[in-house]
Image (spheres, grey):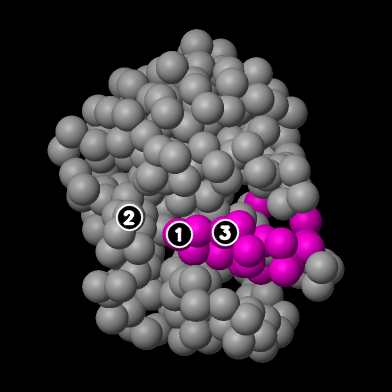
Amino acid sequence: MSRIDALFSGLERPACIAYLAGGDPDPETSLAAVRAVVDAGADIIEIGVPFTDPIADGPTIRRADNRALAAGTTPDRIFELVRAVRAGTSVPIVLMTAYTIVYVRGVDRFYREAAEAGTDGVIIPDMPPEESGDAVAAAGLYGLDQIFLVAPNTPEERLDLILEHAGGFLYLVSVQGVTGARSGLPHGIEERIAALRSRTALPIAVGFGISGPEQVRAIAAAGADGVIVGSAIVAIVEKHLGDREAMCAELKEFVAGLCGAVRDGA
């Protein structure tokens, strides 16, 4: 059983999943930020492998990727980050990146190195399920979960393929558009969670546009097995550039509040 499977099997509430851009704003600060989020109680850490061509990233995460790349972040440094985090925690770690990075490095090599570093799952938003055979095979070979996104406009035939190949959990995109904090709740999310649940036993984690405890509480109450928050966390990193201590303090307070809201909404 993978760490992600074990987590969802053992939790009696939704999981609190936190995203950070790896290497933002520099490798040392990024490690401190991830450790702060782990200390705050996040159940799964999602680390973005920065790349230059955004897929579904809004301006907050695009700026974070640009800072990370300017600081020299590479896949090798992301694996170093994962190793350093893994040395101090058993919290599941998921990498999110573009297929170009995986393909150029070599699919088998990327997954092997990710697994050796301590990664538990991989998300590749721009990888169509029809062309995911090599990645799914490599994930299986090295004991990683291949996590797929389901969007509001995912057609039925593609959903069938996703459910056939997906592992770990399903990443349910709450809205059409790019990542970024939003003030309102996504329309019809409860119905969409229920519809997916009728098709799969995989946990369903909802992400995109979720920015604070009230939304987290509502998504948890709507029946999600996990709630993913990204841009709002990345914005705290951006707010405290040059002041690592203040950054980590606010990250801990904010993520602890999100995790508390998950428990309240369960």
Q: Is residue 119 left or right of residue 228?
A: left
Type of amino acid under label 2: Ser
Instruction: Give the x, y percent position of residue 243.
Output: 33, 28
Which disc is residue 185 wearing?
none
**Residue visible at 49% across and 63% down?**
169
Q: Nearer the viewer, residue 215 or 97?
A: 97
State which region is magenta. Answer: 158-179
First in sequence: mark 2 vs mark 1: 2
Residue to which mark 3 is pinned: 166
- Find out whether the residues at labels 2 and 1 contact each other: C-beta distance under 8 Å: yes
Instruction: Tell me whether circle 1 and circle 3 mark residues in contact (CB < 8 Å).
Output: yes
Residue 168 lies in the magenta stretch: yes
* Residue picked out by circle 1: 168
The residue at which mark 2 appears reads as: 2
In screen coordinates, is 67 left or right of 31?
A: right
Q: Residue at x 66, y 85 (%)?
A: 195
